[in-house]
Image (cartoon, rainbow, N blue to C red):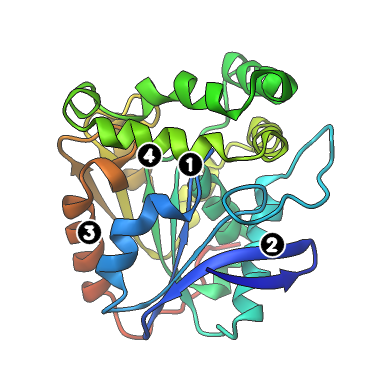
């Protein structure tokens, strides 16, 4: 991996290929490796950048507010700083998965001019319910005591389809490996940030970007009906449901996800950099 010094500290990232820049933003509590199949598939077509968000993978956490963690907007700010640091000035395609999708909404809201297209995978536009918010804050408080490995066991059954858990045990093994090596402080900072994230439903009709909305048919976290409603609210959105996949579409059915991404990217206008959101 490459490492670059940003204002908050070092950030690790993978860079592959040439051409239109595509920024892949991973979910919680994972790292860039959840995109490994997509990186390989897209590198012949695009310049792929896949960072480890700070506190995950090989990126150290640095300083984080102990009460509020890292807001989704702050992660978005740091992604723009990464783009600047690696010399990407042309509009990019931004792909967010789950928490990466929460970050992507803030990127769209704040840095519309840096985008030419948007891909949202297995994410939500709504804020957490009171129950969901309480669960995040409880994990943030208890993670140092629990240890990161417990988080993998808690989340695993919700991340893959029942069939995937039964027939592809290597997926759960990979999840355990990635999550177990994540620093508890990084998990806590992200959970606090997600608990405080705003509802962005009102933003959706304002997004003036070619948008691909992807969801696993068996996703129980960001359900297919919820993701379909997100696509319906965005004027230029295409909805794709991935069969035989739960939340972790990129890992559970990577071939179908790759086909959807490649088709979307190949159909984009070569230069598409309008105002991405109306103000």
Q: Which residue is mark 3?
A: 258
Contact flag, marks 1 and 4 (Cβ < 8 Å): yes
Q: Is residue 141 above or below residue 277?
A: above
Residue depicted at x 79% and y 52%: 62
Q: Which residue is mark 4?
A: 174
Q: Earlier in the sequence, mark 4 or mark 2?
A: 2
How far is disc 4 from disc 2 in space, using C-alphas? 29 Å
Q: Earlier in the sequence, mark 2 or mark 1?
A: 2
Name the mark nearer the viewer: 3 or 4.
4
Name the mark nearer the viewer: 4 or 2.
4
Contact flag, marks 4 and 2 (Cβ < 8 Å): no
Is 259 on the left or on the right of 16, as rendered?
Answer: left
Of the pair 140 and 200, the residue shown nearer to us = 140
Q: Which residue is mark 1?
A: 178
How far is disc 3 from disc 4 in space, using C-alphas? 20 Å
Element under disc 3: helix
Q: Earlier in the sequence, mark 3 or mark 4?
A: 4
Let me know if residue 98 appears in the view. yes
Pinpoint residue 22: horizontal percent, then vertical percent: 42, 71
Q: Is residue 263 above or below residue 28?
A: below
* Quarter of the view holding residue 149: top right
Element under disc 1: helix
Contact flag, marks 1 and 3 (Cβ < 8 Å): no
Let me know if residue 234 appears in the view. no
Is 125 on the left or on the right of 215, as rendered?
Answer: right
Q: Which mark is residue 22?
A: none
How far is disc 3 from disc 2 in space, using C-alphas? 27 Å
């Amino acid at each position: 991996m490459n490492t670059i010094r940003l204002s908050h500290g070092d950030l690790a990232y993978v860079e592959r290929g040439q051409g239109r820049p595509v920024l892949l933003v991973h979910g919680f509590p994972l790292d860039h490796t959840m995109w490994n199949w997509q990186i390989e598939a897209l590198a012949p077509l695009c310049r792929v950048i896949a960072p480890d968000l700070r506190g995950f993978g090989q990126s150290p956490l640095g300083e984080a507010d102990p009460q509020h963690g890292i807001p989704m907007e702050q992660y978005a700010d740091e992604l723009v700083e990464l783009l600047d640091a690696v010399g990407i000035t042309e509009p990019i395609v931004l792909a967010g998965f789950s928490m990466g999708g929460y970050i992507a909404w803030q990127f769209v809201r704040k840095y519309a001019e840096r985008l030419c297209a948007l891909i949202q995978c297995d994410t939500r536009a709504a804020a957490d319910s009171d129950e969901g918010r309480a669960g995040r804050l409880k994990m943030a408080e208890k993670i140092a005591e629990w240890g990161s490995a417990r988080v993998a066991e808690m989340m695993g059954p919700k991340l893959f389809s029942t069939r995937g858990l039964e027939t592809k045990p290597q997926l759960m093994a990979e999840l355990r490996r990635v999550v177990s090596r994540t620093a508890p402080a990084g998990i806590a900072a992200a959970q606090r940030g997600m608990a405080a994230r705003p509802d962005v439903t009102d933003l959706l009709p304002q997004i003036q970007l070619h948008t691909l909305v992807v969801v696993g048919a068996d996703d129980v976290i960001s359900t297919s009906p919820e993701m379909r409603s997100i696509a319906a609210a965005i004027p230029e959105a295409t909805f794709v449901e991935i069969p035989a996949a739960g939340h972790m579409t990129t890992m559970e059915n990577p071939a179908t996800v790759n086909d959807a991404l490649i088709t979307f990217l190949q159909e984009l206008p070569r230069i598409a950099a309008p105002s991405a959101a109306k103000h």
